[in-house]
Amino acid sequence: MSRVRSRAIFVLIIALALGIVGVVSLVRQANLGQPGQAGETEAPAAIPPSPSPRGPFDLSAKRLTEAIVLIDTSGSMRDDGKLAQAKAAARAVIDQLPPNVHIGLVRFADDVETLVPLGPVASNRGKLRAALDVLDAHGNSALNNALVSSVEDLRSTATDDPSQLGIIVLISDGQDTASAKTPSDVSRLLSQARSGRLPVRVIPVAIGSDANMSALAFIARASGTTLHRGDPDSPSGLLDGLGA
């Protein structure tokens, strides 16, 4: 993935999390039903419209305050340069966040590990980049466990500020081989996390030509977001247009 393309994609990811961008045919989307086989995809689809201002998940009065970059370091990420792509995606997110947003970095394989605790981007950026530089890939993937843990951790930071919004940028090939948590557990939690004192949205970024698009799209649908392609094989027309 070129640096320019990577930065452009993740500027829009952050904007989508804030509920301020309407984009049509931004990325290739996958089957939004139950997770299926790795690499299953549907025809490209338009991004769903923003929630109604009167709906239960309205984000119009929210501002991004908390963010976790959740990166897959399981053994499958060794293949085809996927870990390098994932690191580039993570760096792009870090570079585009406003300095006052709190950001943390979590990696997962067999286990889930917080590499950089939540803190202001301005003071955490160097730590985040250093942690990314030394990541390697090994072991099985406990993707569902990592999602549940990260969502619960982010929700625990809620304050009395009614404008809070948290996001988790999940960067993964979508494989899960070691979780105790099921897709149903994840779906239920993500649905609950869309409201409350600190709403949390998960934005999946699919890495690799063999990514389990069905599983990642299932996560996006449960969280009310959009699945993004983060690999260099994605179509050239990723960014068809945007409007405020």
Image (cartoon, rainbow, N blue to C red):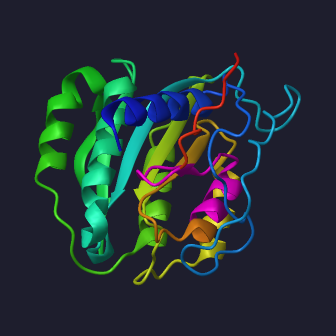
On the question of residue 112 being in view, the answer is no
Tell me which residue sits at (58%, 66%) in the image: 213
Residue 57's x, y, as percent?
A: 76, 38
Q: Foreground: 162 or 132? A: 132
Q: Is residue 145 visible?
A: yes
In the figure, residue 112 lies in which quadrant? bottom left
Residue appearing at x 66%, y 25% in the figure: 241
In the rendered image, residue 166, in percent from the top left (x then y), is placed at 52, 37
Q: Is residue 170 magenta?
A: no
Front-lying residue, 4 or 138: 4
- Asked whether, in this view, residue 184 is left or right of residue 170, the answer is right
Report the front residue among 161 and 67: 67
Image quadrant occupied by the N terminus? top left
User: In the depicted view, which residue is nearer to us: 212 or 101?
Assistant: 212
Instruction: Residue at 72% x, 27% y: name it.
Output: 22
Q: Which image quadrant: the C terminus?
A: top right
Residue under the image location 26 percent in, 76 percent down = 75
Query: Which segment is the magenta one?
Result: 216-234
